[in-house]
Amino acid sequence: MVLDDVYRSGEEPTGGARAGSGVSSPAAGAALGAGAGSAAGADAAAWAQRMALPIDRLAAAIADAVFFAPVATLCMAPLRRAALVAQLTANHSGWTLAAAGAFAAVAFALIAYHALFIAWLGATPGKRLFGLSVVSVWDDRKPKPGAALVRACAFAAEVALLGIPWLAIFANDRRRPLHDRIGDCAVVGGPGRGRAAAPSHFEAGVAAGIFAAVLATAAVVAASAWDDFARDLKEADAEARELEERGLLCQAAADLRAEWPEGERPSRLEAALALAAFAGIEPDCLGREADHEAWQNYDSRSLAYAAQAVAHRDEPAVAEKYAAKACARENSASDACLLARLASSAFDEKRGDMSPSADDALLSRASGAGGPAAPLYVRAFAIRRRLESRDYASALALLDDLPPRQGLASLAAGERAKALWALGRVPEARATWAASISSASASGRQELAGASCASELELGCSSEARRACGAFVGDIKVRHEPIADAESLVAFVRGDECATGLAWSPKPARALAATRDGRAYVDAVTRARLGDASGARKALRQLLNRSASAAGGDSDEALGLESAAIYFDAQARLAQMAPSIAEADEIWRDWEKAERGDAWSHLGRALVQRFLELGAPRKALSAGLLLRGSDPLNSALAQAIVVAAYRAGDPKLAADTLRSLDELAAPSTERSPASLADFDRIAQDLRARARGPGGLAVGKAAKAAGGGRAAESTTGDER
Amino acid sequence: MIFPFLRGFLGPRHAPATWALLAINLFVFIGELPSYERAQARLEALLEDPAFMGAQGQLFAQMIEREPQLFPGESLGAMQARVKKGDVEARSLLGALAMRNPQFVAHAEAYDFGGDEVAIASWREAFRQVRAIQAEHPSYRWGLSHLNASPQNWVSYQFAHSGFMHLATNMAFLLIFASFLEARIGSALVVLGYLLSGLAGAFAFTRLTGLTASPLVGASASVSGLGALTGFYLWKEKVPFFYLIFPQPGYMGFTALPAWAILALFALPDLGGYLASVPDVSSVAYSAHLGGAACGGAMALALRAGLLASDPYDPEQGWQWFEG
């Protein structure tokens, strides 16, 4: 049995190892004897006759790695400790230094391990295990210390190159990798182990091929890894510095706070809350500010609890507990409690007192009715709640009262323009956008321009829309950042289509789309624009089917379609191309049931137009009236309703809608969709009728009844 | 892969004391397995909650700030400063470290913390549950921790393991070293070596690392003591090591190496691990391994100096219980 042999051999090393110990071994002695009396060429032949098998060398290298590992662990230990301490104390440069030190320590130990063992024994422990030894090519003896050191240094450099140059043992004719040749050495096998011949052309060729492939791959991997590493390092440093500067909390809040004169400043948390109300900071950031305040500052904790309730709105049970705390500490009429009640409707309901609802209380507090002026965050949340409940007039009044602060300016201006737009005060909204875009920061500018472009497109692709969208699209093209989220992509594509018109090219959109679905969407739109109706419809259907089947899963590819934007825009494009009323009707049935939103309205407008074009004014009218419920002051929609009602034989509704349209400050004079081409003729006809006795009566009757669909749908503009 | 093989696993007939030690370890493991799994699952569910860990990090930071004398060492103070600045990462890290810190665990329940009262209330509830689970968790009952440091824990920790792999590796090396030694120096010295190395490991742990709130368990210190005993006792004597580079003839098998290679293979990584560890933060008990190894080395020197008499176990005679 092998083990018994080994065990009995006791003091003596095994056969293989014995042969490796250099000059004293009979084989080496014989070789030396042969070499001594002959020319140098024969000398070289002596080691060349005993070249070690590559597989033996591989095994020896693995064994050496096993033996070296404990040594390396020990050498690195103090530096690993230093790195850990640096990590704990967030000392980035200290970490880099310690990591570099650990690397250098291991390199030093590796060189020492190889140089010492080879100079001393003529073989590393791993080589001895497989009977290999290192000899000098000049005299076939164990290498001189200097040669051993040079060889070890070259070997360490090869290890640093992931050991790739080492593969030369398969390709080099004497099976000597770089470190052997630099040290004028060769690795020979002991007696009882196989001898390697020079590699055949085939082996050398395969090895060279693998060598080249591995080298190329490694070069690419190393280059990208280095790039990543350098960037990570740079980013980590920048991030660390940034975190250091702003104390890890929201910089925007600190900046906003600094705009007040000393002594009147709102607290940092108040500033963060005001920004959060306008979505000016990430929810996460508000959470950190609230958390920090709740833990560190015991004086203002009622507001901190209210902010925690706002930050935990996704977890109603937690939000409720925080709201209870916020209201327990001060009396229930405090601003903090008011905010907490807004954040946790569950808590608000359980309070069960008869005081006005949180919304009403917030509004009256914000408009300064009775008592001192409301703090900034109360006003900000009041504005947000007003906008959410479509009470644009109150929102606008509150916005006008906001103190002029740089940190809030572009956010407030954006909300203001949207409110004005929703109230039908189109020129004022445009002026607000124009003024705020010119003074906003880069990211604020893009957001404002995007909002203005999207709003203008609601009225069709007018010259105003082309101007607004041109600015927005141009900005994105200049920045050239990939667009991953579907909503921005759709806004970009639609804005680009309108701004560039007939010159529209899908190239920028396709290059900017970051997801597969995004690119598929751009391709489908491209087909539609090129007039390939059937191809476009097929592509859009595929896109919609994928989104339907992916809705249940959570694959990354489905992310692009999670947003309603692509879905509704794809449907809208299908609707625009629908060849028959039946097909448009199918889309309409889906649309009727779908969740309301901006993208939903976009599809609705497309349906109204298509129904008009297909000669189905009754369907166009019912779709238009449904849309009007959520968007009462859209002039293009009102025009469509006038046309649809007139054609559907309901002149009373048409006349009422026309009147409400005339009351708008500046109805659009452009008739971009072809379906509205005869709007002016119809309007003339209706006005002529209204001047006649019968027509007036019709109008009066509708008003007197106080009802009727037209009257109902126009209540929004009676301010 | 290379490890000392010595004489392999000698059977119970040749090494009865070794197998008795192994049997005790096995019985403890199997007997406590159901309650271990149950307690571990409940514990992990509680500790995985980021809200719990975040709050605990804040509380620990607060305690460090208020009672600096209880928490010497640079790392905890530095992390506390990071938490105070609002560093979320440092907060959850500190929360995890708090679970192992004896001062925190001992004082936290009755401590008058200030801060986010909602978070503190949920933390208190969860922490109470964690403590209740720990009270019946086998690792905490058998192991040596700051709160379970009675004399019997100094012994019982040597027979408890935290998982199958932990048990399997310790037992494999126990069989290799102890069964070899039993045939060489006798049963009594093997058992003595196991227990003394365990005690020395625990002692080194309390001195070098300090007892933590999470328990020290495992036969590692005892086994590394027996390994060191073998290495130091035989020193230059060549003993078989098993190696496997490729699973084919010529690249796997046995080779004879001097016995001190055992020390190089086992004690060096432990020393490296110990030197690389930071008090309050690192979790593997390298200092216990080193303490066990030192004890084994001392016993080997005593044997070589003739202070201890070896009495190889002879399967033909068995234990000579009643001979003077």
Image: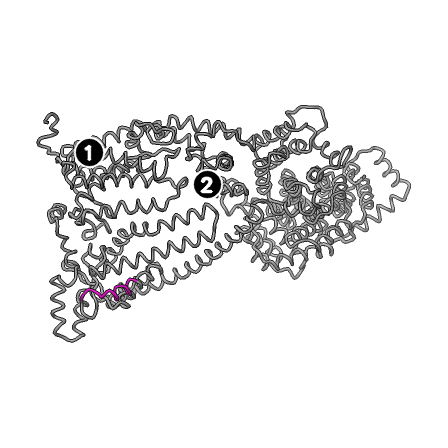
Chain at numbered mark 2: B
Left/right of residue A201 with respect to residue B38 in the rendered view: left
Quick one: SS at disc 2?
helix
Task: Indicate yes or no whether the magenta region holds residue A150.
Answer: yes
Q: Nearer the viewer, mark 1 or mark 2?
A: 2
On screen, residue A567 above or below A314: below
Q: Quadrant of residue B14?
A: top left
On the image, the x and y values in percent for residue B208 come to 34, 40
Vertical placement of residue A269 versus A206, above or below? above
Identify the residue position indicated by label 2 in the image. Answer: B76
Mark 1: amino acid: Thr
Residue that appears at 42% across and 35% down: B101
Q: Earlier in the sequence, mark 1 or mark 2?
A: 1
Per the rendered image, the range of residues in magenta is A141-152
How many labels were placed on the picture?
A: 2
Q: Residue furthest bottom?
A: A39
- Disc 1 marks which residue? B18
**Could you tell me which quadrant the C terminus of chain B lies in?**
top left
Q: Going by the image, does A371 lie left or right of A589?
A: right
Residue at (29%, 51%) from the top-left corner? A71
Query: Which amino acid lies under the numbered mark 2 shown in the image of this protein?
Result: Leu
Secondary-structure class at tag 1: helix
Q: Is residue A615 visible to the viewer in this orientation of the structure?
A: no
Q: Position of residue B107 (x, y in %)?
A: 46, 29
